[in-house]
């Protein structure tokens, strides 16, 4: 472990912002004062014009997403969403997890859209980019307010998170699940707590996430486990173990995706792996090169999520075996998109 390692953060550097003329300070340790070992998180309120985003990707099972937060304090070092922070004038590195942009008007924007006569119900993914249950949500409760509006308008929603804070909203999720209006995906890609603490420093522990799967399933909320991302050389051997435990705790299904280090994330991850696992760094990086045809990232539809080559094939075979062995005859129930339209028709009758 490098003595320069910054505890409590995933990224150890600030990469340059390609949209800015100035260069971000690459050394975050410069900001530490008086013996401090933690760089404080800064919450920045922004005024959003819209909250529902159209998603055009054949690799994703949803067409719309919502993100009440930009940037994520969880600090997952591999996170593809890091690159979006550059559009806001920040670095994809430490800035992404230290400067969190908050859309406090997200609930109002959501309600304006849902009550519009033009809006037709489609499942929306809450957290398509950054985690809607990251630490600041405990204080601000923006995600909870959005769920209250979705339930009010009987609108379907999917959630993906790495935080057990989702259990706080079990009252709403339970009611929505009775009408097939919600699915929850819990991301679990390792049972190794040492690896998890370095790779995803401010997320819930793997134990807590498995417990969250169990609590959601026991409450009747359709729960899915995403074993994502798979990072060859670090966690690919854990697929069957995670799948087995998830099934025993009541998960309806599993999914996976291969790590892809596009844009600035490649520099951030390489710096991280060389500091945390100096003796394994070359092996890990070479395996990632192998699954993406000589690159650390891949933007090609149909291949970017699964990779190519022998290592990618072995991972896919493990995944298929896990599904067959532990999730046979299990499936996620379809979303109910009719209830929202019925609700709006009933509301309109009140004006006649």
Image (tube, helix red, strand yellow):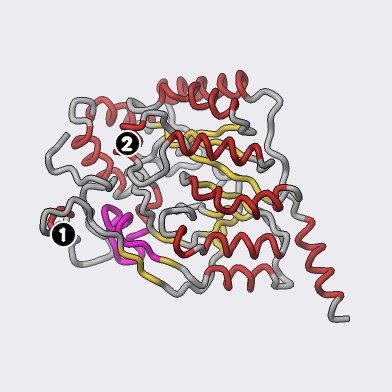
The residue that appears at 24% across and 35% down in the rendered structure is 273
Q: Which of 271 and 222 is in front in this view?
A: 222
Residue 241, can we see it? yes
Q: Which residue is drawn at 49% across and 55% down?
A: 132
Q: Where is residue 31 in the image (x, y as percent from the top left)?
A: 16, 59
Real-space Cα distance between discs 1 and 2? 33 Å
Along the viewing direction, whichever of 196 and 300 lies nearer the viewer: 196
Asked if residue 105 lies left or right of residue 193, the reply is right
348 with respect to 98 (left or right): right
Side (left or right) of 312 relative to 352 = left
Q: Residue 295 carries which label?
A: 2
- Residue 348, above or below 262: below
Can you name the residue that lies furthest to the bottom here? Answer: 352
Please tell me which residue lies in front, 344 or 215: 215
| 73 falls in the magenta region | no
- Give the numbered dot on residue 31: 1
Q: In this view, does 185 lie above or below 112?
A: above
- For disc 2, the neighbor class at 10 Å (few under 14, some 14 to 19, many from 20) is some
Q: Please name which of the two marks, 1 or 2, marks the residue nearer to the observer.
A: 1
Residue range corresponding to the magenta coloring = 85-101
- Quadrant where the N terminus sits is top left
């Amino acid at each position: 472990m490098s003595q320069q390692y910054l505890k409590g953060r995933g990224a150890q550097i600030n990469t340059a912002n390609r949209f800015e003329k100035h260069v971000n300070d690459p050394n975050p340790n410069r900001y530490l004062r008086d013996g401090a070992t933690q760089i404080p998180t800064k919450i920045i309120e922004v005024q959003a014009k819209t909250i529902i985003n159209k998603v055009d990707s054949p690799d994703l099972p949803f067409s719309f997403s919502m993100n009440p937060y930009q940037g994520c304090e969880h600090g997952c070092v591999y996170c593809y969403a890091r690159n979006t922070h550059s559009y806001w004038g920040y670095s994809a590195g430490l800035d992404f997890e230290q400067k969190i942009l908050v859309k406090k008007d997200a609930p109002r924007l959501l309600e304006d859209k849902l009550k519009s006569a033009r809006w037709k119900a489609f499942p929306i993914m809450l957290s398509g980019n950054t985690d809607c249950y990251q630490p600041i949500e405990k204080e601000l409760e923006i995600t909870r307010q959005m769920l209250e509006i979705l339930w009010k308008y009987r609108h379907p929603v999917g959630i993906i998170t790495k935080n057990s804070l989702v259990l706080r909203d079990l009252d709403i999720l339970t009611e929505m699940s009775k009408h097939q209006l919600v699915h929850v995906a819990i991301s679990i890609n390792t049972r190794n707590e040492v690896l998890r603490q370095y790779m995803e420093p401010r997320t819930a522990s793997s134990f807590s996430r498995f417990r969250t799967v169990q609590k959601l399933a026991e409450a009747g909320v359709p729960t899915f486990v995403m074993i994502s991302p798979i990072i060859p050389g670090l966690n690919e051997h854990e697929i069957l173990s995670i799948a087995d435990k998830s099934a025993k705790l009541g998960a309806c299904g599993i999914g996976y995706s291969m790590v892809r280090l596009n844009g600035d994330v490649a520099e951030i991850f390489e710096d991280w792996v060389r500091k945390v696992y100096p003796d394994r760094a070359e092996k890990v990086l070479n395996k990632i090169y192998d699954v993406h045809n000589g690159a650390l990232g891949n933007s090609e539809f149909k291949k970017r999520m699964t990779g190519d080559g022998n290592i990618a094939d072995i991972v896919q075979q493990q995944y298929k075996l896990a599904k067959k062995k532990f999730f046979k005859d299990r499936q996620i129930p379809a979303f109910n998109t009719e209830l929202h339209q019925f609700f709006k028709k009933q509301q309109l009758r009140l004006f006649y």
